[in-house]
Amino acid sequence: MKNNKLSIVLRGLIAENPVLVLVLGTCPTLAQTGNVIAALSMGIAATIVLVCSNMVISALRNIIPDTVRIPCYIVVIAGFVTVVQLVMQAYLPDLYEMMGVYLALIVVNCIILGRAEMFARKNNVVDSALDGLGMGLGFLLALLVMATIREVLGAGTFAGIEIPFLIVRDAAGVVKNSFTLPILTQAPGGFLVFGIMIAVINKIGPKKGEEKRKNFSCEGCPSATVCGRVACPENTELVTESDDRRDGGKEEA
Amino acid sequence: MDFKVLIYILLTGVFVNNYVLQRFLGICPFLGVSKKFDQASGMGIAVIFVMLCATAVTYPIQKYALEPLGLGYLQTIVFILVIAALVQFVEIILKRFIPALYKSLGVYLPLITTNCAVLGVAINNITDGFNFVQSMFSSLGVGLGFLLAMVLFAGVRSRIENCPSPKSIQGLPITLIAASIVSMAFLGFSGVIGNLLGVS
């Protein structure tokens, strides 16, 4: 029994890591990994929201009507995001400024809505909390790994502390030589490092990940249940049909 | 001068602050729907449409309801619900009155509800302190930037798909690396627009 609980947590951490294996929540992953501090705070904030919302949604799973469940989940998640926002604004104003709009955007993070839809609505409160914890920590871990790569190679620092071999100063403290790739801390570096990390995982990781990800734009997408997969590119038959209709529509217009 | 500022806001949204390539908002549709040119452009146009509607609705709510009543902290909850309801509403209206447009944009609308770029632009317009007209121009710029990124990237991607690449970087990794190069190209725009129009 205890093993079972532990496996729920560990699954999110590695085997079903939400970022690196399921490729969910790409926006904050790319945006908040320019430095380690931002990644750490993003990961912790998302974990708190994920655990709390999973617990509440699981507790209410017999009350929420099936047809309006997505809006209900969004309200619960948005409520917890607001709590985290207010707490951070009060006690960590600098961090709040730094994270800016991305803190509010935890609401639309696919991982959180995805876990509510896939796990919390079918399982009890304790399991859901553990699942949220595992997934949140997996998210945090992926963010930290990526932020470490980007900050160390891009800025020559780790969490703001300079690394002596990468930034060489002379006796007066003036930077003499720095062996860094500043592009990695900017936008293109985010895409590049994320791409390379997924490639490495494809190479060394378990083959299962590839299958899980095959339809990453649809299977993992929480709106798949809303849109009935009509708009998803993988669903070629329906899309082709609508393409034909669209051409017709344009001519009429 | 006022007009100059509007143009500046518009062009900044398209090129300098491109939401997809520079600020990482709306990555999911960017990676998911950019496989074919016509899908990419359809999605882009639907996003412009929803962004303009969302701004037109959320801005008055923030200014005339939340701020006077001291409910600014409810911004996140109210905005996401308003956007979700709005997308449904737009879908119903289009289906009923403009079926031709619904046929071309309708399939993309449900995907946009959880698109972080739409919520992001609504919140950013408030935090940047824009007035209503400026907000609308900013949303239009951001939407056009999204369309531009989608269309450009669909072109890049159709060429990548035909190239032989090592097995482990096929699929998502090569797509992300290509996105990195496109994003690098957009880095070149920073500062250009401001200097061109003499606005900082």
Image: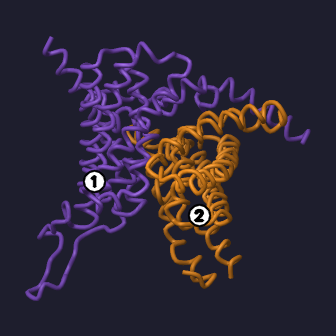
Chain colours: A purple, B orange
SS at badge 2: helix
**Residue A216 pos. (x, y %):** 47, 32
Numbered disc 2: what chain? B
The quadrant in which the N terminus of chain A is found is top left
Q: Residue furthest right?
A: A252
**Residue B166 pos. (x, y %):** 40, 42
Mark 2 vs mark 1, foreground winner is 2
Q: Residue at x 65, y 39 (%)?
A: B86
User: Would you name the residue on which mark 1 appears?
Assistant: A147
In the picture provided, is A109 more to the left or to the right than B141?
left
- The residue type indicated by label 2 comes to Gly
Q: Nearer the viewer, residue B173 or A65?
A: A65
Q: Residue at x 24, y 25 (%)?
A: A130
- The residue type indicated by label 1 comes to Ala
Q: Is residue B53 above or below residue A246?
A: below
Number of labels in the image equals 2
Q: How many C-alpha atoms fall within 10 Å of the one at disc 2: few (<14), some, or many (≥20)?
A: many
Label of residue A186 in the image: none
Numbered disc 1: what chain? A
User: Would you name the residue on which mark 2 appears?
Assistant: B13
In the picture provided, is A51 more to the left or to the right than A241?
left
Q: Nearer the viewer, residue B9 or A151?
A: B9
